[in-house]
Every structure is written in C-alpha cells, then in structure tokens.
Image (spheres, helix red, strand yellow):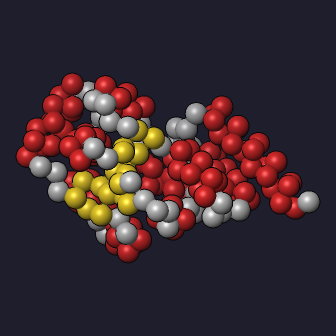
C-alpha cells in the first residue's frame, strides 16, 4: 500500500521518535513534489528520502484538482491540497492530521487516516514495545501544537500502560 503523507503526520512521527519504525513497515510513503520542495527540502528531507520517502510529481489534472480544492477550502494549505490531489489521482491512501483535509478527502472518496492509525499499525505489527509507543504518543500529546483528539490519546495511553504491565509481569 502506498501512503501519501502531509507534513503534520511526518512531524508527529518524528516528535514521537517513530519515523524509522513506520518507514520499516511494509508500506511505501510518498509526498507530492510541491510539498517536498516547500516544506521538507533540506536536512530533514534528506533524512526522509534516506528512509524511503518517495517524491512524486502531480499530473496537470492533479494540479487543477489541487487548485480547485484550495479555491473551495481557503483554510487548507496549498501543499495539503496537492497531497490530496496526489492521493486521489493515484488512488493511494492519504495520511493527514488536518480535520478539514480529512473531510475533503472523504468527499473525494479518498481513503484517509492519520498518526494514531499508524500507531495502531505499529502496535498490531508488534515491532515496537508498548513503552516505546506510550512514550512516543505522550511526547506528541505534550506538545502545544498537538491537534490529536484527547479522548483517542487517553484510550491509547491507557492501553499501552496495560501492555507495559503485562510485558513486565
């Protein structure tokens, strides 16, 4: 499965210390070239490329779609609109932490998930200890710009605590 990410999900993964773990999953990760050029280029972008991030050019129809999305949803960033356009044109899954982008993706029949879904995938894969998942999510939740739903954070943190106790028993 190929997953198109917006920048917020990548930032949360980095903040959680889980970038390497997620890129080791049996999925491919991509961003539109516009997003890479505007928000990721540089040392961090090079690190993402080394992990396997693909930078994909959006077609001319995708550009038109992105501009249309932006016109109808002025609060969305241009690069987020390009991420959705890429996911739609390639029928790939969109990863986003932006509620408005998620709503628009659903309206465009684009499958969409976010950071918490990736944590669930890591948990199911069993590649990370519960303590690592707990500490990563706690770090993201403690950040002042965290936009994750508090209820979902609480549910996962409690589940990880139970798993940690079982691992220690």
Work out which quarter of the rendered image holds the C terminus and state it: bottom right
Examine the rendered structure and indicate whether residue 99 appears above or below residue 28. Answer: above
Examine the rendered structure and indicate whether residue 19 appears above or below residue 90. Answer: below
Q: Residue at x 36, y 44 (%)?
A: 94
Q: Residue at x 24, y 54 (%)?
A: 32
Please identify the residue farthest to the bottom as the structure is shown: 50
Across and down, in percent, residue 37 comes to 23, 60
The answer to whether 69 appears left or right of 138 in the picture is left
Across and down, in percent, residue 77 comes to 28, 39
Query: Is residue 112 or residue 14 the one in the foreground?
Result: 112
Examine the rendered structure and indicate whether residue 106 appears above or below residue 166. Answer: above
Across and down, in percent, residue 127 comes to 63, 64
Across and down, in percent, residue 64 comes to 11, 38
Q: Quadrant of residue 87?
A: top left
Please identify the residue farthest to the left as the structure is shown: 60
Query: Is residue 125 or residue 104 the one in the foreground?
Result: 125
The answer to whether 97 appears left or right of 63 in the picture is right
Q: Does the rendering let one see residue 43? A: no
Q: Does the rendering let one see residue 22? A: yes
């Amino acid at each position: 499965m190929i997953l198109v990410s917006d920048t917020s999900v990548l930032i949360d993964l980095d903040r959680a210390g889980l970038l390497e773990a997620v890129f080791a999953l049996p999925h491919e990760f991509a961003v539109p070239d516009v997003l890479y050029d505007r928000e990721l280029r540089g040392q961090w972008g090079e690190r993402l490329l080394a992990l396997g991030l693909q930078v994909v050019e959006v077609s001319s129809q995708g550009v038109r779609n992105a501009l249309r999305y932006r016109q109808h949803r002025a609060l969305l960033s241009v690069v987020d609109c390009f991420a959705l356009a890429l996911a739609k044109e390639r029928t790939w899954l969109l990863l986003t932490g932006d509620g408005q982008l998620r709503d628009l993706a659903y309206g465009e029949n684009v499958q969409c998930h976010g950071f918490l879904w990736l944590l669930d995938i890591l948990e199911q894969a069993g590649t990370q200890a519960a303590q690592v998942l707990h500490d990563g999510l706690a770090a993201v939740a403690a950040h002042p710009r965290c936009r994750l739903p508090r209820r979902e954070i609480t549910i996962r943190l409690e589940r990880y605590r139970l798993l940690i106790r079982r691992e220690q028993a």
